[in-house]
Image (cartoon, coloured by chain):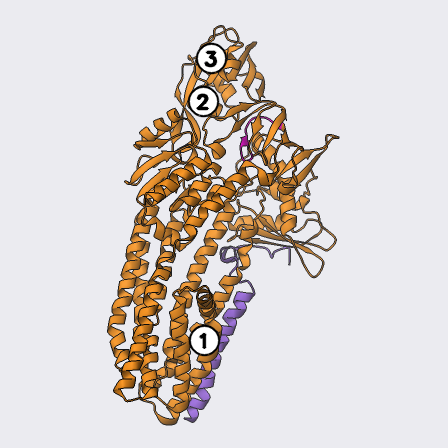
Chain colours: A purple, B orange
Amino acid sequence: MNGLLFLIPVALGLGLLGLVAFLWSLTSGQYEDVEGAALRILEDEPPLNE
Amino acid sequence: METLDQAGGEAMSCCAGPLASATTIRAESSARIGLLEELNADARHLAGGGTNYQIALPAMHCGNCIITIERGLSPMFGIEKVRANLSLKQVSVTLKPGNDNLQPVLSKLETLGFTPQSPGAAARAGNDEVLSGLLRAVAVSGFAAANIMLLSVPVWSGAAGTTEALFHYLSALIAVPTVAYAGRPFFISALQALRHGRVNMDVPISLGVILATMMSFYESVIGGGHAYFDAAVSLLFFLLIGRALDQMMRSKARAAASRLAALSAKGGMVVDAQGDLTYLPLDGIKPGMVLRVAAGERFPVDGTVIEGATDIDRALVTGESAPIAVTTGAAVEAGTLNLTGAVDVETTRSADQSFLAEVTQMMAAAEHGRSAYIQLSDRMARAYAPVVHILAATTFVGWMIWTHGGFHESLTAAVSVLIITCPCALGLAVPVAHVVSAGRLFAAGIFMKDGSALERMATIDEIAYDKTGTLTTGEPVIKTMHIPLGEPVEVARALASRSVHPAAKALAKALASFNMALVSDLHEVPGHGVEAIANGRKARLGRINWVAEIASRTTGGHETGVAFALEGGPLYYSTLSESLRSGATRLPKLDSFVISGDGAEQVEAIAHAVGIAETHAGLKPGDKLALLQQKAAEGHHVLMVGDGLNDAPALAAAYASMAPSSASDVGRMAADFVFTRDDLSAIGFTYKVALKTARIVKQNFGLAIVYNIFAVPLAMSGQLNPLIAAVAMSTSSIIVVANSLRLQLVRS
């Protein structure tokens, strides 16, 4: 039972962490240009506009 | 024109489009002035003082394009940030505070090989609020469903006492906020339906989920064994996935539609008393103003030509296939295309009273008939909801009699009936099938507006085709030609290859195998044809009467054809016929008829070629509409396939409608389906997918009902336990989804 009291919050916390990570990625616009992101990695030089 | 900023100009590799002809360049540079107005209207002013613009670049297609655009624009003066988006084919440009001139950016994009366009209001859906909201709800309910399922396993495996209570409370802690947050889309839609005195699928869904949650909470508090948190939340999760997919399909179709929206005239160049040109948007153009319309542009409003001569293509407006020569004094309608020469037009009516507006009003009136169509799922809900509620009430009354007033047991049994009949599989049956079909059609270059279009498409029994631009490509081909070999044919080819007139283009194509003679002083005479000097003799190609002026003898003949003569020589002419779209001879085997605004002779020739007996020629937009309404009154479900402004009311009134992507803006707006391939086989394929979808949806309903036949007696007899509920609900949903996925396999 003590184990449960410790493990259940840990399990839920990890799940929540994943949920928060997904929601953050959604709001920060990471799904707005899926095709472009895959191709940007092939660029040799850092972009000039940062 | 602005001077071009040359910073960062690099050699274009794969991204340069083919060089546009002189006509399109002329049209573009004037359209770009209007474009600037549109982009400014849509610009967002940021807190820091900068301005953000979204510019659509249809030519963007690869990783190289991203680099070219970003490196090309970034070094320019007054640019804060540039970010190209390949999925949307747009670039987001932020100008520094104090800089509000976007023109250099547009010119620069032009030199890089990307023609800028306005993304249109609909395409600003890069941040689709509804979809992100649904995705958040999917994520939250997914997290909750997984954790509650895990917490339920020990309870099902026999945890008891404190452990069971603890797990139930934990589940409640997760489930209650989840249902409150993730269930909102269903609750809102259910409330709206009830407020209008209707029932839709969301009513029984909301009722089931809310009751299940409330009852489970109560059971947890009193220490009973009936906690259905897992069933309620996983149900929400599955249904939300369906909703999100449905929304994705819609926004994809919307984005595709707005990407297709061509550079139609949304304003015009007004000539003032001093002869200066200013761009005015459409609603600023008043009757009595003078507009200058360049070759290659569409007339923005109705007017009368007061200077210049040209040929106009009225195909999209009236369905007439042959271009018409107009000179001063001729009336032109809004939406017709100016082909060969710039003209000044005096406006006779403002935009909101022009021919286009009349058609739009007619269309809006016609659409009322279609809005009466009720989606299949809602029709099911109307039959389903009362049955479920009667069953629950019967259960309650039966248990009250059976247990002599055991209120708690009776209520538990009644609520468990509502939970088990909560139409999860039914709620998924239709949207999932529609989404899979939409994806299948999308892959074939056809996009649909919404799911109800597929349902309507599946029940059509007659097809009405427009002729010009639908059954035909709108580009004429040479049928007969009598130009002798040697010098005449070579000169004719030289002249034909330099004209933008469709008839001359067709001749150039037909003569492509011959040599081209050297000619000098070649110029186009708007409204007449092309003239040049070949070996010291004048040569003309164009309208028969004009060409006959230099010929030795005149031949009476066809006004539709294109004539050619060398000075003092005989007159040669060729007749034109329209070329059928590919696939026009393999149309679906349904009763069909052709309705067109063109002359009876042309219509019958084309109808005969594609094997359709019934024709209606010379129809105005109102006549087409009346004909379709008459067919509808006779009880026919007619599919209308058309492309023009003159078809728009008919497209809106028909039971279902399709348009090619080359259609006028209004025509595309009115159609249920738009196909981007030139091939008419899209019609047959769409019909096939619609029939198949209808079949799959019926099977899905059948599966959902079979599940209920097994599960309801269990619930009514009080034998339902949370384990059975959770398993039954999940499996029925998964079976329905798997069955819908079979639609991916439809062969074209």
Residue B394 falls within the magenta-colored stretch: no
User: Looking at the picture, which amino acid does disc 3 mark?
Assistant: Pro
Q: CA distance from mark 3 to mark 2?
A: 13 Å
Query: Which numbered disc, 2 or 1, marks the residue that appears first in the sequence?
Result: 1
Disc 2: which residue: B507
Counting residues from the start of the chain, the first of labels 3 and 2 encountered is: 3
- What label sits on residue A39 in the rendered view? none
- Is residue B338 located in the magenta-colored stretch of the structure? yes
Q: Nearer the viewer, mark 2 or mark 1?
A: 1
- Is B217 on the left-hand or right-hand side of B745? right
Crowding at label 3, few (<14), some or many (≥20) Cα neighbours within 10 Å? some
The residue tagged 1 is B179
Image position, residue B191 (x, y; %) = 46, 68
Q: Residue at x 45, y 21 (%)?
A: B560
Q: Chain of mark 1?
A: B
Which residue was labeled with disc 3?
B488
Decide: is B431 above or below A20: above
Instruction: Using the rendered view, name the quadrant where residue B302 is placed.
Output: top right
